[in-house]
Amino acid sequence: MEYHNPVLLKETVDGLNINPDGVYVDVTFGGGGHSREILSRLGSRGKLFAFDQDEDALANVINDDRFTLINENFRFIKRFLRFHGIKKVDGILADLGVSSHQFDVAERGFSTRFDALLDMRMSQKSELSAYHVVNEYDETSLRRVFFDYGELKNAPALARTILEAREKNPIRNTEQLKNVLAKYLPAHKSNKILAQIYQAIRIEVNQEMEVLKEFLQQSLEILEENGRLSVISYHSLEDRLVKRFMRNGLFEGEPERDFFGNFTVPFKIIQKLIVPTEAEIAVNNRARSAKLRVAEKV
């Protein structure tokens, strides 16, 4: 399987402050680049567990006694680590978003570059696909998807147009979807708008926001004291959740204060936001929107 270079490789793994004898988790294994870097810093007693729900990633499994690859969604991180006898870990790494491999395989339907069946499932075992969202969601639900996950102001018009089109014939592939929505895709910014539309559908198909929330909450439970959480996000919806949770352990609002007006926070922010250099972006275009945040459990 062809996988591109991992984004912010050194910075993300540096953020974990690796203990050679520690236990670490890479919840987005993909091509295994971040996992290999972690293993290179572990001693003989260290352990690394990796998660990836995409069956394609199994082709990249690392032959190392210290390594275990779990073919599951990382929303189940606590359950599957316990299955392997692990209750606490020293660090967790997450490189969120779609892998380069998934974008590059046309039939997966993730990329605006190719005509493919409406799929967009990160796990081929999932029943919900982009086809179901586009052809079976009611107008209110479609409007929610485009507005909440694509941040598209014309979400009502997009939803209504899709409903009118599918009454005549099902919308089966990405090219048909583009044609149905053509009047909302002016030439000078069609790629940007299409990317927002695809992002919205993909997030809904894979329940990405719900998964991220569940993962972050569990990470707090399973991290050892002084354990590190190192997370790369690719769009503002993800980054907002990560930033807020690292700041105060919540996704909305502020924590309750005690009698003296103080509140306890679960994490200490290790360093300011890290973004790729121009040199890395030139080599790996996927890195252009990456944002890395690192926090330590207190």
Image: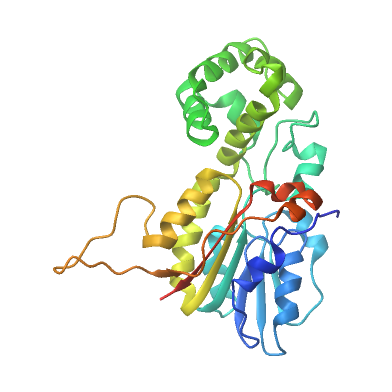
Q: Quadrant of the N terminus?
A: bottom right
Residue at 57% of width from left, 34% of height from top?
A: 200
Question: Relative to 78, does residue 195 appear above or below in the rendering?
Answer: above
In the drawing, does residue 29 fall left or right of residue 83?
A: right
Q: Position of residue 220 (x, y in %)?
A: 44, 68
Question: Relative to 175, does residue 93 appear above or below in the rendering?
Answer: below
Q: Quadrant of the C terminus?
A: bottom left
Q: How many marks?
A: 0
Question: Relative to 180, does residue 146 appear above or below in the rendering?
Answer: below
* Residue extending farthest left: 259
* Residue extending farthest right: 1
In the drawing, does residue 211 fall left or right of residue 106?
A: left
Q: Nearer the viewer, residue 275 or 113?
A: 275
Q: How is the image coloured?
A: rainbow
In the drawing, does residue 13 fall left or right of residue 237?
A: right
| Quadrant hosting residue 55 | bottom right
| Quadrant hosting residue 121 | top right
| Quadrant hosting residue 112 | top right
Residue at 76% of width from left, 43% of height from top?
A: 103
Residue at 71% of width from left, 88% of height from top?
A: 43
Q: Position of residue 126 (x, y in %)?
A: 64, 45
Residue at 65% of width from left, 86% of height from top?
A: 20
Regarding residue 161, the answer to whether it shows in the image is yes
Regarding residue 213, the answer to whether it shows in the image is no
Q: Position of residue 233 (x, y in %)?
A: 59, 52
Q: Position of residue 187 (x, y in %)?
A: 71, 18
